Amino acid sequence: MRTRIRHGVAAVAAVSALCFTAAACDGSDGKKPSDGKERAEEDGGKAAGASGTPLTAAQMAAGTLVAKDLPAGYKASKPDEAADEKYTTDKQDCAPIAAFLNEKVAGATTGGMVDFAGEGGDAMLTQRVFTFPGRGAEDHVKAVGAALEVCTSFAVAQGGEKLQITVKKITGPKAGEESHTFRMKTSIPSLSLNFESDLMVARQGSGVTRVAFIPADASGHKAFGDLARRAGDKFAKGVQS
């Protein structure tokens, strides 16, 4: 089965790419993320705690999954090149979650990028690792957490296509210093497509990882906890190396 994964960290975009190219889908106070600029501590003029130096390329690579980190049957593939597309949402409170659709993360430098297809090619796992200067990573992940408290559905539009998305927090493994897991259900009315994806965003220091899992069918959601734990452990340990 041929798949096309988006080059950026956008998890839902990866899901959309899968659905457009393969029979893997059913066809019948939320702040904006920080711009990543370093902020000084009020009392000392220096970044501290979660603030600090961005990760190196080597650290980001060390925090990125490889096939041997995953259950048998998962095979890695290089993300395809794709143009940077901008998705806009109709609800500002949902903007940090809608930002998962975009290729680029404002203020961040992207490092590790990898996609995996499960045995048979029907399930898909993607991971992106990136870094911010200053407190950008902390602000970014906290904004997602705040959005998950108030955002349950939104619509996005890009290139004349409209997507309806519902969001639900789910129980998942704890990863790094802060993490959030949730499920997104996407509907593309014009194509009669409906599909679900499980996602995790986690922070360790100035680094952030996004993990998305697209199961072959509803029964596959149960695999996400183990996959997210593997990704979170690799990320948290790797970026501290």
Image: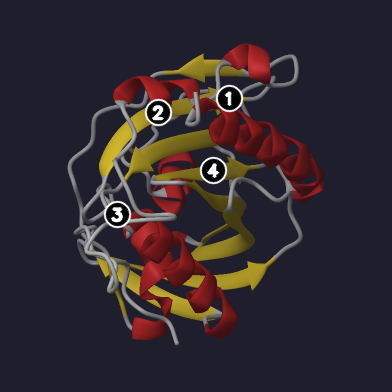
The local crowd at label 3, few if under 14, some if 14 to 19, many if 20 or more residues have their Cα within 10 Å, is: many
Q: Distance between the residues labelled 2 and 4?
A: 14 Å
Between disc 2 and disc 4, the foreground one is 2
Q: Where residue 238 sits: x, y (%)? A: 53, 26
The three-letter amino acid code for the residue at tag 1 is Ala
Q: How far apart are marks 4 and 3 (CA)?
A: 14 Å
Q: Which of marks 2 and 4 is nearer the N terminus?
A: 2
The three-letter amino acid code for the residue at tag 4 is Val
Q: Distance between the residues labelled 2 and 3?
A: 20 Å
Element class at badge 2: helix
Between disc 2 and disc 3, the foreground one is 2
* Mark 2, residue position: 60
Q: Which of marks 3 and 1 is nearer the N terminus?
A: 3
Q: Which of marks 2 and 1 is nearer the N terminus?
A: 2
Asked if one can make out residue 9 in the rendered structure from this viewpoint, the answer is yes
Q: Which of marks 4 and 3 is nearer the N terminus?
A: 3
Would residue 20 appear left or right of 230 to someone viewing this image?
left
Q: Which of marks 4 and 1 is nearer the N terminus?
A: 1
Disc number placed over residue 24 in the picture, else none: none
Disc number placed over residue 117 in the picture, else none: 1
* Mark 4, residue position: 211
The local crowd at label 1, few if under 14, some if 14 to 19, many if 20 or more residues have their Cα within 10 Å, is: many
Between disc 3 and disc 1, the foreground one is 3
Q: Where residue 34 sits: x, y (%)? A: 28, 66
